[in-house]
Image (tube, rainbow, N blue to C red):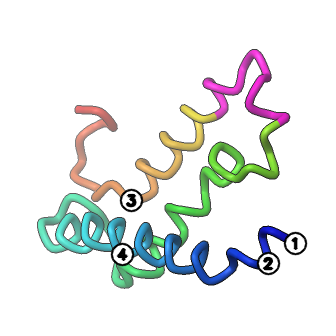
Amino acid sequence: MLAADLGGAVTAHLDVLTTQLTQIIGPGADAGVFITTEPTTTARAVFHAPGRFHDPRYFRDWGQHDIEAHFDAVVELVLRGLRARTGRPPGA
């Protein structure tokens, strides 16, 4: 019931977060750091990719001994997917 009552606030908050990510990803693409033709769509995907680590529905998972490694793997996957191909090895 509480979630239904807060639906508008949650949606507005998610819009703010997506806008913030778009403001990072768009200029990054313009500078050649990231690859995307749709910064807003990419921002939504980047937000949702680590959902397991910020969505309260998954709180039971947060206590797993290897949860940090799982998070690191998702972050690495997202960054590798966004990173412009420069011919340099990742992280270089």
The reply to whether dot 3 and dot 2 touch (C-beta < 8 Å) is no
Quick one: 40 or 15, which is closer to the camera?
15
Q: Residue 76, how many percent across, how many down? A: 48, 40
Q: Which residue is mark 1?
A: 1
Q: Secondary structure at mark 2?
A: helix
The alpha-carbon separation of the residues under discs 3 and 1 comes to 38 Å
Spatial CA distance of label 4 from label 3 is 17 Å
Cβ–Cβ under 8 Å for marks 2 and 1:
yes
Q: Are marks 4 and 3 in contact (CB under 8 Å)?
A: no
Q: Are marks 3 and 1 in contact (CB under 8 Å)?
A: no
Which quadrant is the N terminus positioned in? bottom right
Looking at numbered disc 1 in the image, what kind of residue is underneath it? Met
- How many residues crowd mark 1 within 10 Å: few (<14), some (14–19), many (20+)? few
**Which residue is the site of mark 4?**
19
Cα–Cα gap, marks 3 and 2: 34 Å
* Residue interval drawn in magenta: 60-70
Q: Quadrant of the C terminus?
A: top left
Q: Residues within 10 Å of mark 3 (few under 14, many from 20)?
A: some
Q: What is the residue that sits farthest to the top in this orientation?
A: 65
Magenta stretch: residue 31 in it? no
Dot 1 or dot 4, earlier in sequence:
1
- 88 vs 4: above or below: above
Q: Earlier in the sequence, mark 3 or mark 2?
A: 2
**In front: label 3 or label 2:** 2
Which residue bears the numbered disc 2?
Answer: 4
Majority secondary structure in the magenta region:
helix
Q: Quadrant of residue 49?
A: bottom right
**Mark 2 and mark 1: span between their CA atoms?**
5 Å
Q: Which residue is mark 3?
A: 82
Whichever of callouts 3 and 1 sits on the residue coming sooner in the sequence is 1
Label 4 vs label 2: CA separation?
23 Å
- Neighbor class of circle 2 (other Cα within 10 Å; few <14, some 14-19, many 20+) is few
